[in-house]
Amino acid sequence: MKFSSKLIEEAVDAFSKLPSIGKKSALRLVLHMINQDVSFTDDFNNALNNLRHNIKSCKHCHNLSDHDICEICADPHRLKRVICVVESIRDVMAIEETGQFSGRYHVLGGVISPLEGIGLDQLNIDTLIERVKSEETEELIMAISPTIDGDTTIYYITKKVSDLPVKVTTLARGISFGGELEYADGLTLGRSIASRLPYQVQSES
């Protein structure tokens, strides 16, 4: 793709580094920006700079937040002793969209995956165990994508809290095995939260 302007070329290169944005899509975005008032691009740039420099990770649940403690953890109306364990921040957003959950969250930051080099030290599992102990958690909802790695992670966490008075539940299998939680439709995800099941640890042979 040839450009008559080096400035446009640099802007297209910058946009095309975003996920799912190819050169043509990047060019459309750049041309759109050019056709807007200067104040539009200034506001856009300020919003990105503000986001990048001021976004925080919640000290309790590892969700993204404007403050040290996110709005969900700080909300006195949320159930304090029910924690929904998820892989990513996008999963928190997906579950919140359903309106079916009124507890709090814990973002692991992924799942145990030896093939991808993701081990226990790269996940927020230790802080989860500490929360279960300190917050006297009554239920852990394992809202983790139903994959082999996801099930391995659920099994590991369940074993770690096996000596604690906490119930471990999983989403009802309206979520197909092998699927990604964030791509489930809202109705299915909402029903899976509402119809969660006790997690059964398989006996080791």
Image: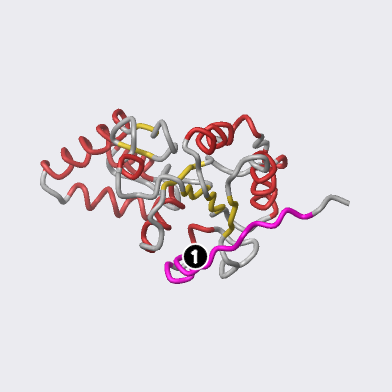
Q: Which of 58 and 83 is in front in this view?
A: 83
Residue type beneath disc 1: Ala
Which residue appears farthest toward the right when viewing the image? Answer: 205
Circle 1 crowding by C-alpha within 10 Å: few under 14, some 14–19, many from 20: some
Q: How many labels does the image show?
A: 1
Is 53 left or right of 93, judged from the image as shown? Answer: left
- Residue 2: x and y in percent read 37, 46
User: Which residue lies at the image location 73% right of the left edge and 53% below the top edge?
Assistant: 201
Q: What stretch is highlighted in magenta?
A: 186-202
Quadrant of residue 46 within the rendered picture:
top left
Q: In the rendered image, which quarter is residue 161 located in?
A: top right
Residue 3: image x %, image y %?
33, 45
Above or below for 193 versus 105 = below
Q: Which of 194 and 6 is in front in this view?
A: 194
Q: In this view, does 201 lie to the left or right of 34?
A: right
Residue 195 part of the magenta-drawn span: yes
Q: At 38% from the left edge and 55% from the top edge, which residue is drawn?
A: 102
Instruction: Judge whether 44 appears above or below 35 on screen.
Output: above
Q: In which quarter of the image is residue 61?
A: top left
Residue 156 point in image, percent of width and height: 69, 43
Q: Residue tagged by mark 1? A: 184
Q: Position of residue 160 (x, y in %)?
A: 66, 39
Q: Image check: 28 left or right of 83?
A: left
Does 158 appear in magenta? Answer: no
Q: What element carries label 1?
A: loop
Left or right: 21 in relation to 162: left
Q: What colour scheme has been applied to the protein in the rendered image?
A: secondary structure
| Residue at image coords 49%, 42% | 107
Residue sitting at x 25%, y 33%? 50
